[in-house]
């Protein structure tokens, strides 16, 4: 860190009231504004300054090719695959590929710390960002905290600690802000391990979701919107509960998702070096997107601990997406028997593999486009990236 930057940071600290969030209701609580890097917020915040293409070019050497529909959906990449740990990590969100890579990077001395998010002692879903320095601390951060998490709030500690090599694990909005301030962190090497992210909620919103959807909200330890068109809840006693997407009480849940997530077009974490999710892979497998050489270096560390298969794509999502647009708008909820039946039919004939990922991206981008158009019309043109405009342009949206 140069003296010039330290000076800037000090100035920024002076102008920082703790509650300050320039993105206002669109703020995703990424944590940047809890630090003196708030100085860079107008440029860095994903909700104030959409700059995916420019940052892709810096991080990956090119931005999306707009003539290639796979680039619209999955971003800049060298390779995609389905993978799973041969020996899954107990209690991880999926098979624990993210935690395994982070632990390996610490063990081999490639990094001195890992930005990740544990939970508080009192509440398993209350996020507590940390810089992990040991494998145990990384392991304690496994599993999703399905709530907005201020991961970047620990960035000041990075600079103060004098750390030079860092891994950051995070979701798209966090990573856009991170990429913007990357050069100010005084690091020799930054590694970025991203997960896809969608439909996140505040802690209060999560409670409402659990209470309206699960039979036993207080015992849920883990949940995921799975590729079989059901939400899978895992409970403390090890039992699994499934609820079909089509049976969700959309009328009660419509306002549960954070406005930031209703305005987000970076589902697939465009700016991470390596992305680990699940939605482009068969059920039970994880989906890996290697975006650049740094991402490849990270994945290579765990190749002997994962099995892989090529990505596949089956079905045609277009009709299902088109039909979901007015259904979501009118907050239609099917009776549970019909929802289960619909779930079974869709699972049999519906989109699979990458086509399922496209289905999910299309459904969310059309919904979010309408949200921004209705709530922030003045932001629409600059905030929606060109690739997202192409995706949304495939569908007929209501005029208002
Ligand atoms: P683990 O080894 O269990 O590690 C999980 C890591 O996630 C931990 O290192 C932790 O630090 C980090 N983390 C946990 N909560 C948060 C948070 N709130 N913000 C930032 N980082 C966090 N994948 C898809 O393919 N499609 C989706 O729609 C999708 N939605 C997601 C929504 C959210 C809110 C999150 C956090 C993730 C989502 N993912 C999605 C990613 C997916 O659920 C898994 O996190 C990913 O596949 C890694 O699994 P794992 O077993 O390797 O992770
Ligand atoms: Fe600040 Fe992050 Fe909120 Fe934007 S999203 S206002 S950068 S805390």
Image (spheres, grey):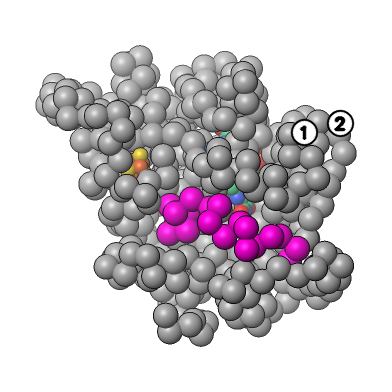
- Across the whole image, how many numbered discs are drawn on residues? 2
Q: In this view, does 331 lie to the left or right of 350?
A: left
Is 362 a magenta residue? no
For the point 59% across and 26% down, the residue is 119
The quadrant in which the C terminus is found is bottom left
Q: Give the range drawn in magenta.
A: 246-264
Disc 1 residue: CB within 8 Å of ligand 1 = no
User: Foreground residue, 285 or 120?
Assistant: 120
For the point 54% across and 48% down, the residue is 200
Q: Where is residue 125 in the image (x, y as percent from the top left)?
A: 62, 32
Q: Where is residue 340 in the image (x, y as percent from the top left)?
A: 84, 66
User: Foreground residue, 5 or 248?
Assistant: 248
Residue 233, placed above or below residue 326:
above
Closer to the eye: label 1 or 2: 1
- Residue receiving disc 1: 219
Spatial CA span between label 1 and label 2: 8 Å
Q: Do the residues labelled 1 and 2 touch (CB within 8 Å)?
A: yes
Query: Is residue 238 in view?
Result: yes
Pointer 1: residues within 10 angstroms few (<14), some, or many (20+)?
A: some
Lower sequence index among marks 1 and 2: 1
Residue 91, placed above or below residue 364:
above
- Residue receiving disc 2: 237
View quadrant of ligand 2: top left
Q: Position of residue 235 (x, y in %)?
A: 80, 36
């Amino acid at each position: 860190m140069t003296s010039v930057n330290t000076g800037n940071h000090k100035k920024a600290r002076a102008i920082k009231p703790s509650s300050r969030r320039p993105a206002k209701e669109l703020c995703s609580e990424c944590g940047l504004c809890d630090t003196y890097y708030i100085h860079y917020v107008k440029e860095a915040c994903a909700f104030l300054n959409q700059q995916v293409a420019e940052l892709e070019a810096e991080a990956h050497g090119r931005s999306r090719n707009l003539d290639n529909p796979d680039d619209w959906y999955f971003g800049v990449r060298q390779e995609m695959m389905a993978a799973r740990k041969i020996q899954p990590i107990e209690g991880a969100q999926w098979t624990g590929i993210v935690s395994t890579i982070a632990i390996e990077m610490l063990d081999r001395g490639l990094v001195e710390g890992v930005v990740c998010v544990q939970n508080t002692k009192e509440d398993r879903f209350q996020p507590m960002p940390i810089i992990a320095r040991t494998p145990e601390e990384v392991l304690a951060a496994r599993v999703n905290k399905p709530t907005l998490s201020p991961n970047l709030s620990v960035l000041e500690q990075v600079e103060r600690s004098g750390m030079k090599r860092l891994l950051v694990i995070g979701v798209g909005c966090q990573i856009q802000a991170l990429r913007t301030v990357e050069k100010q962190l005084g690091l020799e090497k930054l590694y970025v391990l991203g997960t896809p992210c969608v439909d996140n909620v505040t802690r209060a919103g999560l409670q409402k979701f659990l209470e309206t959807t699960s039979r036993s909200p207080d015992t849920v330890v883990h949940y995921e919107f799975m590729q079989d068109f059901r939400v899978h809840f895992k409970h403390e006693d090890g039992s699994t509960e499934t609820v079909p997407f089509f049976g969700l009480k959309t009328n009660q849940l419509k306002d549960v998702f954070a406005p930031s997530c209703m305005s987000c077009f970076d589902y697939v974490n465009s700016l991470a070096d390596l992305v680990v999710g699940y939605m482009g892979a068969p059920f039970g497998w994880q989906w890996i997107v290697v975006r650049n050489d740094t991402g490849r270096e990270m994945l290579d560390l765990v190749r002997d601990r994962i099995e892989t298969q090529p990505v596949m794509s089956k079905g045609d999502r277009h009709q299902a997406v088109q039909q979901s647009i007015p259904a979501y708008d009118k907050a239609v909820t099917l009776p549970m028997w019909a929802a289960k039946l619909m779930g079974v039919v869709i699972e049999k004939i519906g989109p699979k593999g990458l086509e399922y990922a496209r289905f999910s991206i299309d459904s969310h981008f059309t919904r979010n486009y309408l949200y921004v158009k209705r709530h922030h019309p003045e932001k629409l043109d600059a905030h929606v990236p060109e690739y997202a405009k192409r995706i949304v342009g495939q569908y007929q949206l209501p005029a208002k």
